[in-house]
Amino acid sequence: MLSFDDAVTQALYDTYYSKLFTMKNPDGCEIGLTFFLSHDYTDYFLVHDLWTKGNEIASHTITHQTPIEHWTMLNYSGWVDEAHGLRQIATHFANVPPEDIVGFRSPFLQINGDTTMQALKDMNFTWESSMPCRHFVNPAIWPFTFEYQNVLSMSDCQIGPCPQDSYPGLWEVPLIDYNGTDGFPCAMIDTCATGNTTDIVYNWFYSNFAPRYKGNRAPFGLFLHAAWFLKDQSHFDGYMKFVKYLNSLPDVYMVTISKTLQWIKKPTPLSGMKTFWDCTKPSAPCNQNHNRCFWQNTVPGGERWMGSCLDSCPPNYPWLGNPFGN
């Protein structure tokens, strides 16, 4: 599972994401990425393009605001406005159907326990991925549902408060800790010590992947912020070397989180994988002129721009409580 958090911009698209589009899984389908969108500076024309290429769009809230404590105290309606509001924005300006935006990740991996999960459940999200896991690494824990009190809340709650109640049908895709080169655990790749040469970074990826590949084969996630690539060219080069290695393996599929859960719900042997996932790519109208909207004064403050699939721009910058910019 390859994912990227935060805004989708032209620079990140051209420099990094586009380099992954030529790879195909053993079934002949192109690999799939999951993009956790936050709103500020996202280009929704490019979001539409990513979706039509078979990638998954998930919610990462509208504001992604600081301080982190904000999310600890956020009430039910706040979570609805943030998580579902981002879905509304992406549906309206990128023309991605709401039923295709079913995943969520909280900013800074900070949830507010049952308040967050109830909001996600009520807004018809089917999975979320905000809970780090440190004690169930080898063998690794598999994604699970919230039918009953979950093991992470009971004995591995790394960032509390963790949920205690039952949410039937809502899945958790845990962020299983990596081991940094400094010996410290880390939930997101960009928070890990990984080295500063292409080979060292590649070897770091491999050392974290190998126990899973040779062990219980629980899904392995490459979860990061693309800004990590900007810090050192070796980060991207080592990442690409590792992804190309994965792409050379006949029994490894790089798919979206939703497709991963689809397989978990219906485990299928390698012999049946050629036809398990549908390669058909989605389609929907989008203004091919790449409309770029600009606002000099906005609710969050200062100037903002935004790419859109629509022919015209709304009078106001879309934001919390006003996702369509009315």
Image: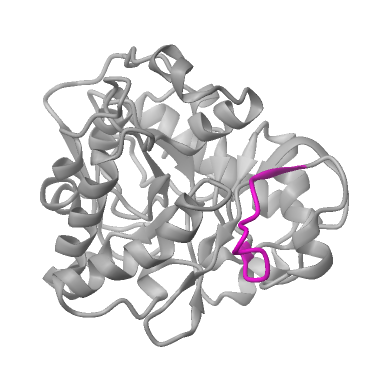
Q: Can residue 299 be seen?
A: no
Overall secondary structure of the magenta section = loop
* Residue at screen point 38% across, 38% down: 252
Q: Which residues are magenta?
A: 132-145
Please count the marks in the image. 0
217 vs 295, left or right, is right
Q: On the image, which quarter does residue 248 sit in?
A: top left
* Residue at screen point 41% across, 14% down: 278
Taking depth in this image into account, of 237 and 92 the one nearest to the observer is 237
Q: Can residue 121 be seen?
A: yes
* Residue at screen point 65% across, 27% down: 265
Q: Residue furthest front?
A: 214
Quadrant, the N terminus = top left
Residue 265 included in the magenta stretch of the image: no
45 vs 154, left or right, is left
Residue 143 included in the magenta stretch of the image: yes
Q: Position of residue 93 (x, y in %)?
A: 35, 31
* Residue at screen point 41% across, 75% down: 191
Residue 252 drawn above or below residue 113? above
